[in-house]
Image: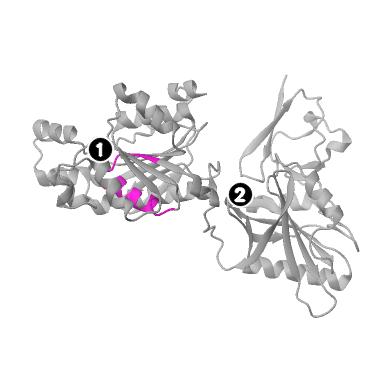
Amino acid sequence: MIKRVPIRDTNNGGTYALEGQPIDVLPRDNTVYVDQAGKTYDPRDNVQLQQLPDAGVLQLPRTTWW
Amino acid sequence: MLVEFLNAAYDALIDLCLAAGSRGTETHAYLLGYRSSAEAIVTTVLRAGSPVEEGAMTQPDYAASAVAMQPYLDRGLTLLGEAHRHPGLIGPSAGDRRMLLDIPQDRFPRYLAVVVATFRDERPPVVTAHSIEDGEIVEHKVRVIDAAYPALLPSTVQQESVLSFGNGSGNSLVLLQVAKLPIRRLTIADDDTFEERNLVRHLVDHAALGKNKAVVGARFLRRRSTAKISAVRLHVGSATMAKVDRLVRDHSFVINGTGHPVASARISQSCARQRRTCLHSAAFARGAGGFVFLQAPGGPCYECLYDLNLESQTDDHETMQTLVTQYGYTEEELHAQIGLWADVNTIASVAAKVVLDYFKYGNDSRRPNLYVIDNHYLTINRRRVQRRTDCTTCKEAS
């Protein structure tokens, strides 16, 4: 079964979707995902798609400024 | 791109950085606001939770920030970028530059890295803003403003070539304003001829009687515009669709001011096929109101609106004669039937404004694409309509 997680797009107000098998891991693209309760999902920790909630997820760039 | 801080947001950022300076640390904040093609306007500086703030490094508190920014996103604000403080160093450090280049541009295009340099002496803070454009780090001008309204047009407007179908009472008012924009070219297509009855609701005078509406319109606007303006005598029908397609393909933006449902559907189909953005506008019967609809490639087309029951009322000669012969309208009633000029003008004003906003924001999926004007209560209802799943035009175009 394909899992589809809608992600709130902070850039243009819409949503986009992460799709794949539930066991697929999130792409390592220098971002982090945060759900509505404030739980953070870091793709560097091999987070699987099924670990994300089905709604209310937001993506932010992972940043360190010097 | 110009980076502009609303007064209060600028003050909040500077206060944040001066406080960090007194602690001897960097500080971090997310920047939220509005964005057009030419401007990024920061209205809100958000420092939520407990960001990592050390002497020469800072990281956001992702969890607290994501929760805190939700209400702002709900109100239509955009995450524009991040700000941090430097003790004395103006602009991004080498590490900041590497960081900026590492942010995924497909997800966060034009993401801002704002640096506030503060100093031990009396020098005022220096604020810089950088983002990535075409893979390169670009510095932007920064200024402080009083109103969060993106007012500037991007320079790309100078490349726009606009094709307008129709130069009737309403569309002539739209074109008067569009022609004042710094566009490159405007082509007006119409096969109708000016009649005496048109004069009470049109810009032209008696000299236009008996002449083609496109030709007279182009002549009128040439003296009032810097754009290259031309006229085409053209009836939009099944026999002329090849020419319609060529014209649409040859322009970057299309205005459908025919007010005729069949012609509008044909123009819509051509724009969907050629992937051109098209603005449709028309008045309802008796000028009771009207609608303005922005059709963008990949989005809903004119035919997707049929469910919404937006029957417009045309004033072409054939329709007027039908009304006279079949329904026995008087001349006065006919004027009321198709709307007086002031009523038509409310629709035209909204149409011109939607053209302006398209040039400012492009096809922004957050913005409404349908505006319905009620002339009785003087209200504008706006919404974002989606494609109809059974629309054959959209299916063929995609």
Residue B40 at x, y percent in the picture = 62, 56
Mark 2 lies on residue: B74
Q: Quarter-wise, where is residue A17 in the image?
A: top right
| Helix, strand or loop at mark 2 | helix
Residue at the far bottom: name it. B122
Residue B389 appears anywhere in the view? yes
Residue at 16%, 36% in the rendered image: B320
Badge 1 amino acid: Gln
Residue B339 at x, y percent in the picture = 22, 47
Residue at 79%, 46% in the rendered image: B101
Q: Quarter-wise, where is residue B284 in the image?
A: top left
The reply to whether the magenta stretch includes residue B333 is no
| Sooner in the amino-acid sequence: mark 1 or mark 2 | 2
Residue at 14%, 31% in the rendered image: B322
> What segment is highlighted magenta in the picture?
B163-181
Badge 2 amino acid: Asp
Mark 1 lies on residue: B313
Residue at 17%, 35% in the rendered image: B317
Residue B186 at x, y percent in the picture = 38, 44
The reply to whether the magenta stretch includes residue B165 is yes
Task: Please report, as a chain letter, where disc 1 is located.
Answer: B
Mark 1 vs mark 2: give the one in front.
1
